[in-house]
C-alpha cells in the first residue's frame, strides 16, 4: 500500500478517453409537503479519463444534486429513486487492467463501508465554500494528512512527506510552513488550493468540483482554474466541473452538459455546444453571456462629450479607515484603509462603473457617498437641481433627509434588502409615506405605476417578498429606489446575485429607466462584463484606491494600469478555441 | 463564435407575468409562523395542555367542587377516590357516583381508617354548590361536578391534614402559580426589552454599561438573595401585595436572559439591508425601530417569554416550598407541596404530591410550546 502513498502509481492499461464514470437515467427526488420535487430527472452522461466535463446550468437546475447523488451525499430527505451510477473500476488507477469491473454506486448504502472506500479515494469532491469546508481548529497539514490516512495505511513520516508533496503540487508557497498554519491565516483562494490538495490526496480517478471558483475573485478564479487544468493534464483524471458561468466553461471544458430544471437539455463537446448549439435554452445561455461584455446596443455609441456635461456629484479625497481603535489594554488593532483618498466625478445622465475585487473598497465607497458610513475626511459635493452645491460628507445626519430622496440605492442581495414582513406595496410605498409624497388612493396608484414601470403586474402588490424569485425581488428593490424621483442611483452589485439570463433582463430594465428618467448611475460591480454592458465610464479600485478611470471601452481595451491589465486578462472569455486564462498577466503590487 | 456576429440587438424584454396568487404568496408573518408551528406535534400538545391549565385557573371557582379552605374533621387524610360514570344499581344508566366511605378510628394508633360501603354518593354535572362570584363579578352557584346532596363530600385527589379537598386546592393553586409566571415574565419583559433594545440599538458606551449590569445581575447568588428579600417582606401585608412583591423578586433575575436575546437580535438587524434601506428611505429612528425592526423581534420575544414562564413557576414553587414565598392562606402549588415536606405525609398520604405532578406537567408543556415557537418564530430563515 505504501507504494500508493509515496508515488503516483503506474497507469494501468487505461488510456485517455476511456469511460471512468457513467451516469444512467439518474433520478433524485426531494419529498415536499404536498408533492415530490424531482431535482434530477433521467440524467445520463459519462465522464472520461483525462477530460473535463462541465455541467452548466442556472440555480435550481439540479447540477449540484447530481454531483451529490454520485457520491450518495444528498441531503436528507432527498433520495435517489432510480438510475445507475457506474464506476468503471478497470479504468481507474486502482483497478486491475483488462477484465471489466463495474460497480453501481447508486445501489450502495449511503453509510456503508463500500461507498466510503470510494469517496475521497476513487472519486473526490471539492465544494464551493472554501471558508467553511476546512476545520478552523486543525492545521492545514493535519487536515490533508487526515484525508490520506482515512484511505491508506502509511507511516507518519510517509504521510508527512506526502502532505508536503501535495501542497507543492497545488502551488502553495513554502509548503513546510503552510502545513503548520491554520485555515484562518489563508485567503479563500489558498484555502481552495488546500481543499484541492485534500481531494487529490489519494490520487482519485474522478474529481468532482462543485462551483469551486464561484466564491472567489476573478484573478483567484483564474489561478484555480489553471491549477485544476494542469493537475488534470498531469494526472489524467476525469473532472466533473459544475458551474453556472459559461465563461468558465469556455476556458476549461472538453465536454459540456447543459442542465435545466433537473434535466439534461443538451450535451456535446465544447466546440459543438459553443459553435452549434441545438437547443433554444443553450442558445439563450450563450447569448446572455456574449451579450454582456460589450456595450449594450440600446445605449448607442459611447458618448465622447462626457467631460463637458454638467457634474452632478464630485468626490474629493474621500477617506475611511476601519478598525482604527486602541484596544482596552492600549494595543492598537490593525487598521484597514477601505477607502483611500478616492476622487471621482459623476456627470449628469452618466453611468459610472466601479469595478474591483472583493475587499477593494468599492462597496464602502458607495456606502460613504450614500452616508450609510461617515467618511473620515474628504468631500462629497452634490449639485442640487437649482445648481447649488452641498457637501454631503460633512452634513449633519438631520439635514440629510432631503438629499436621500435624490440619491437612492439598490442593494446586492434581493433576499436581504426587502423586509420579509411587509407586502410589496408597503415596501415600495415606504419612501413615499415617510417623505410625505403621497397617501391614500394616490399612494396605491403610484405604487401600481411603479410596479408597471419595473415590469411587474399590479397583482404583485399584496404579496410578500417570499413569493418572488430573485430577479423579481430585485425589480421591487429598483421600484423602491426610483419611487421618489431620484437623480442618482447607487447600484451596489445589483445584479451579482442573479442568474445570467435574469441579469441581462435587470440590466436592460436599468438602462431603460436611465433613459426615461435621466438618472445618473454609480454602478458597483466585480464583473467587468456587466460594467462594460452598462457603463459609460469605469473606475478600477484596488485596495481602497481608485487606480484608473476612463471611458469604459478605453479602459477595457487598452488598460494602462498593470492591475487593470491583470484583472482583465483573468476574465474568462467566451470562445473555447481561444482560451485566455493561460495567457493572463499577474499583478504584484510593490510592498507597502 | 457565430452568435457574436449574428446576434440581433436584444428585443425589449416583455413584462414578466406572475402566476396567480396562492395562499402562500400573500401569507403574512403570523400565518407562516402558525403553519410551521402547526407541524410541530409536541408543541401543539404543549399548547393544548397550557391552554387547559389557564382555563382551569381562570374558572377555578367553577371547576373546584368545594371551597379550598373548607376543613372537615371527619375526613383527615382521606385517600383519593375514583369517580365512576356508569351506575348499574337499577339497570344501566350514565350517572357519576363515588362509593360512600365509613370512617373509623384505629383504637391503638388512633389513625382514621376509611372503608368503602355499598352506598353511593351521586354526583351531578353543573349542579348547585356553594355560591361564588365568577371572575369576581357574576354571582353564581353552579360547579362542574358536585354531589347531589350538598352536605356530601368526595375527594378526587384525597384530602390533607385538615380534611380540605386537595382537588379544589390544586385548582385554586393553578390560578396563582400559572399567573405568577405571567406577571413575573411581564416585568422581566419590560425590563429586558427596554434595556436590551437600548443596548443593541445604540451600542457603544450604553451597550457596555448595560451588558456589565446584566453580568452583575447574573453573578448574584440568587437563592440567598431571594431568601433574604422574601424574609424581609412583612408578614402583615395583605396577601396580594406579598404576592406581587414575590413575583417582582423572582423576575429581578429573569430579565437578563431576555435583554441579551433582544440585544443580539437588534445588533444583527441593525445591519440588515432592509433596515439600512429604511433609513435611506428617510424613515425616522422611531419608525425604523417600531415598523421595521420590531416585527422581526416579536415572534422571538414570544418564544423567549414562553420559555421564561416555567422558570418563574419553578422559582415560585421552590420559594414557597421553603416557606419563604407565598404563605398560607394563599394557595399555590408550592404552598401545597409544603404539606408534603415530612416523612409522615410520604408514608400516610402520598397523594399530597399530586400538585408536584402539575408543576412538572406545566413546566414541560410550556417548554415544549416555547421550543416549538422558537423553531417557528422566523419563517424566513433559510
Image (cartoon, rainbow, N blue to C red):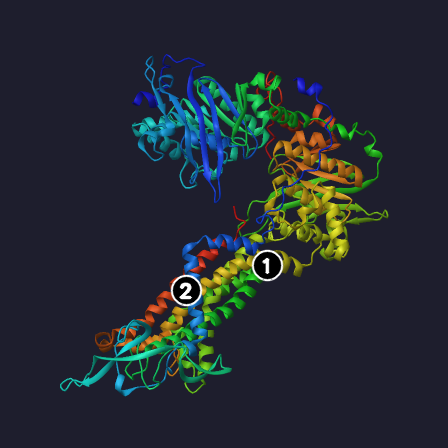
* Chain letter, disc 1 residue: B
Looking at the image, residue A99 sits to the left or right of residue B242; the answer is left
User: How many tags in the picture?
Assistant: 2
Which residue sits furthest front? B91
Looking at the image, residue A88 sits to the left or right of residue A551; the answer is left
Q: In this rendering, does residue A55 appear at all?
A: yes
Judged from the image, the secondary structure of the residue bearing numbered disc 2 is helix
Q: Quarter holding the N terminus of chain A?
A: top left
Q: In the rendered image, which residue does mark 1 sit on?
A: B294
Q: Is residue B171 above or below residue A191?
A: below
Q: Is residue B364 above or below residue A207?
A: below
- Near mark 1 (Cα within 10 A), the count class, few <14, some 14-19 or many ≥20, is some
Q: Which mark is residue B49?
A: 2
Quarter of image, res B323? bottom left
Rendered location of residue B165, percent (x, y)? 32, 80
Q: Quarter holding the C terminus of chain A?
A: top right
Which residue sits furthest right? A386
Q: CA distance from mark 2 to mark 1?
A: 29 Å
Q: Residue at x 51, y 56 (%)?
A: B34
In this view, the mark in front (2 or 1)? 2
Sequence-first disc among 2 and 1: 2
CB contact under 8 Å: marks 2 and 1: no
- Near mark 2 (Cα within 10 A), the count class, few <14, some 14-19 or many ≥20, is some
Quick one: B10 or B78, which is closer to the camera? Answer: B78
Amino acid at each position: 500500500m505504501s507504494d500508493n502513498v509515496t508515488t503516483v502509481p503506474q497507469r494501468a492499461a487505461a488510456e485517455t478517453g476511456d469511460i471512468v464514470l457513467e451516469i444512467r437515467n439518474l433520478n433524485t427526488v426531494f419529498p415536499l409537503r404536498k408533492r415530490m420535487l424531482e431535482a434530477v430527472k433521467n440524467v445520463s452522461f459519462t465522464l472520461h479519463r483525462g477530460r473535463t466535463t462541465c455541467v452548466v446550468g442556472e440555480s435550481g437546475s439540479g447540477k449540484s444534486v447530481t454531483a451529490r447523488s454520485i457520491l450518495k451525499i444528498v441531503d436528507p430527505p432527498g433520495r435517489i429513486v432510480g438510475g445507475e451510477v457506474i464506476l468503471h473500476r478497470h479504468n481507474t488507477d486502482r483497478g486491475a487492467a483488462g477484465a471489466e469491473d463495474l460497480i453501481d454506486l447508486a445501489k450502495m448504502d449511503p453509510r456503508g463501508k463500500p461507498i466510503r472506500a470510494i469517496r475521497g479515494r476513487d472519486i473526490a469532491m471539492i465544494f464551493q465554500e472554501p471558508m467553511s469546508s476546512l476545520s478552523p481548529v486543525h492545521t492545514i497539514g493535519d487536515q490533508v494528512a487526515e484525508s490520506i490516512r482515512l484511505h491508506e495505511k502509511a507511516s507518519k513520516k510517509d504521510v508527512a512527506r506526502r502532505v508536503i508533496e501535495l501542497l507543492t503540487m497545488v502551488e502553495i508557497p513554502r509548503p513546510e510552513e503552510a502545513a503548520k498554519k491554520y485555515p484562518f491565516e489563508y485567503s479563500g483562494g489558498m484555502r481552495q488550493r488546500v481543499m484541492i490538495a485534500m481531494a487529490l490526496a489519494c490520487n482519485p480517478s474522478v474529481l468532482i468540483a462543485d462551483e469551486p471558483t464561484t466564491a472567489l475573485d476573478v484573478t483567484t478564479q483564474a489561478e484555480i482554474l489553471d491549477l485544476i487544468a494542469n493537475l488534470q493534464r498531469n494526472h489524467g483524471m476525469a473532472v466533473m466541473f459544475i458551474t453556472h458561468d459559461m465563461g468558465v466553461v469556455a476556458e476549461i471544458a472538453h465536454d459540456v452538459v447543459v442542465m435545466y430544471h433537473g434535466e439534461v437539455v443538451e450535451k456535446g463537446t465544447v466546440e459543438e455546444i459553443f459553435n452549434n448549439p441545438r437547443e433554444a435554452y443553450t442558445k439563450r445561455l450563450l447569448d446572455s453571456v456574449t451579450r454582456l461584455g460589450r456595450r449594450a446596443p440600446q445605449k448607442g455609441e459611447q458618448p465622447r462629450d462626457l467631460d463637458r456635461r454638467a457634474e452632478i456629484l464630485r468626490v474629493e479625497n474621500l477617506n475611511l479607515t476601519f478598525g482604527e481603535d486602541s484596544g482596552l489594554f492600549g494595543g492598537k488593532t490593525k487598521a484597514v484603509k477601505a477607502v483611500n483618498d478616492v476622487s471621482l466625478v459623476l456627470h449628469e445622465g452618466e453611468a459610472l462603473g466601479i469595478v474591483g475585487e472583493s475587499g477593494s473598497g468599492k462597496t464602502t465607497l458607495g456606502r460613504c457617498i450614500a452616508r450609510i458610513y461617515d467618511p473620515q475626511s474628504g468631500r462629497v459635493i452634490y449639485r442640487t437641481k437649482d445648481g447649488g452645491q452641498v457637501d454631503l460628507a460633512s452634513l449633519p445626519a438631520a439635514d440629510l433627509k432631503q438629499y436621500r430622496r435624490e440619491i437612492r440605492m439598490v442593494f446586492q442581495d434581493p433576499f436581504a434588502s426587502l423586509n420579509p414582513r411587509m407586502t410589496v406595496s408597503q415596501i415600495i410605498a415606504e419612501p413615499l409615506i415617510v417623505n410625505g409624497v403621497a397617501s391614500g388612493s394616490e399612494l396605491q396608484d403610484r405604487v401600481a405605476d411603479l410596479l408597471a414601470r419595473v415590469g411587474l403586474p399590479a397583482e404583485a402588490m399584496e404579496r410578500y417578498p417570499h413569493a418572488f424569485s430573485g430577479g423579481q425581488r430585485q425589480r421591487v428593490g429598483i421600484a423602491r429606489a426610483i419611487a421618489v424621483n431620484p437623480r442618482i442611483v447607487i447600484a451596489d452589485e445589483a445584479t451579482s446575485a442573479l442568474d445570467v439570463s435574469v441579469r441581462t433582463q435587470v440590466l436592460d430594465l436599468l438602462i431603460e429607466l436611465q433613459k426615461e428618467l435621466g438618472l445618473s448611475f454609480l454602478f458597483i460591480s466585480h464583473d467587468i462584463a456587466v460594467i462594460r454592458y452598462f457603463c459609460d465610464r469605469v473606475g478600477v479600485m484596488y485596495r481602497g484606491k481608485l487606480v484608473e478611470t476612463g471611458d469604459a471601452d478605453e479602459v477595457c481595451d487598452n488598460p494602462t494600469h498593470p492591475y487593470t491589465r491583470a484583472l482583465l486578462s483573468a476574465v474568462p472569455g467566451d470562445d473555447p478555441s481561444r482560451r485566455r486564462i493561460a495567457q493572463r498577466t499577474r499583478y504584484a503590487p510593490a510592498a507597502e | 463564435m457565430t452568435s457574436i456576429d449574428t446576434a440581433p440587438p436584444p428585443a425589449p424584454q416583455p413584462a414578466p407575468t406572475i402566476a396567480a396568487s396562492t395562499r402562500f404568496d400573500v401569507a403574512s408573518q403570523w400565518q407562516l409562523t402558525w403553519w410551521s408551528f402547526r407541524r410541530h406535534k409536541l408543541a401543539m400538545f404543549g399548547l393544548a395542555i397550557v391552554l387547559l391549565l389557564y382555563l382551569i385557573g381562570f374558572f377555578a371557582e367553577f371547576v373546584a367542587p368545594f371551597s379550598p379552605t373548607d376543613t372537615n374533621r371527619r375526613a383527615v387524610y382521606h385517600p383519593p377516590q375514583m369517580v365512576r360514570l356508569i351506575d348499574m344499581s337499577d339497570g344501566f344508566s350514565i350517572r357519576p357516583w363515588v362509593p360512600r366511605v365509613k370512617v373509623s378510628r384505629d383504637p391503638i394508633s388512633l389513625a382514621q381508617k376509611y372503608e368503602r360501603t355499598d352506598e353511593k354518593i351521586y354526583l351531578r354535572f353543573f349542579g348547585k354548590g356553594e355560591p361564588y362570584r365568577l371572575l369576581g363579578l357574576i354571582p353564581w352557584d353552579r360547579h362542574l361536578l358536585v354531589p347531589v346532596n350538598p352536605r356530601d363530600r368526595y375527594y378526587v385527589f384525597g384530602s390533607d391534614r385538615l380534611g380540605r379537598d386537595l382537588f379544589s386546592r390544586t385548582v385554586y393553586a393553578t390560578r396563582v402559580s400559572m399567573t405568577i409566571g405571567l406577571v413575573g415574565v411581564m416585568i422581566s419583559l419590560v425590563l429586558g426589552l427596554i434595556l436590551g433594545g437600548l443596548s443593541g440599538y445604540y451600542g457603544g458606551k450604553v451597550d457596555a454599561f448595560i451588558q456589565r449590569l446584566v453580568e452583575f445581575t447574573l453573578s448574584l447568588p440568587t437563592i440567598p438573595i431571594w431568601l433574604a428579600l422574601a424574609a424581609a417582606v412583612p408578614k402583615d401585608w395583605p396577601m396580594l401585595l406579598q404576592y406581587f412583591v414575590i413575583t417582582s423578586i423572582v423576575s429581578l433575575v429573569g430579565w437578563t436572559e431576555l435583554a441579551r436575546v433582544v440585544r443580539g437580535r437588534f445588533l444583527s438587524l441593525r445591519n440588515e439591508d432592509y433596515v439600512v434601506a429604511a433609513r435611506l428611505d428617510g424613515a425616522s429612528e422611531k419608525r425604523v425601530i417600531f415598523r421595521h425592526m420590531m416585527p422581526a423581534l416579536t415572534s422571538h420575544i414570544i418564544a423567549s417569554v414562553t420559555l421564561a414562564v416555567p422558570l418563574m413557576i419553578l422559582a415560585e414553587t421552590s420559594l414557597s416550598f421553603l416557606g419563604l414565598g407565598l404563605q398560607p392562606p394563599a394557595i399555590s402549588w408550592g404552598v401545597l407541596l409544603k404539606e408534603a415536606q415530612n416523612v409522615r405525609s410520604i408514608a400516610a398520604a402520598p397523594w399530597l404530591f399530586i400538585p408536584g405532578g402539575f408543576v412538572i406537567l406545566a413546566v414541560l408543556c410550556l417548554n415544549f410550546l416555547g421550543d416549538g415557537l422558537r423553531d417557528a418564530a422566523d419563517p424566513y430563515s433559510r
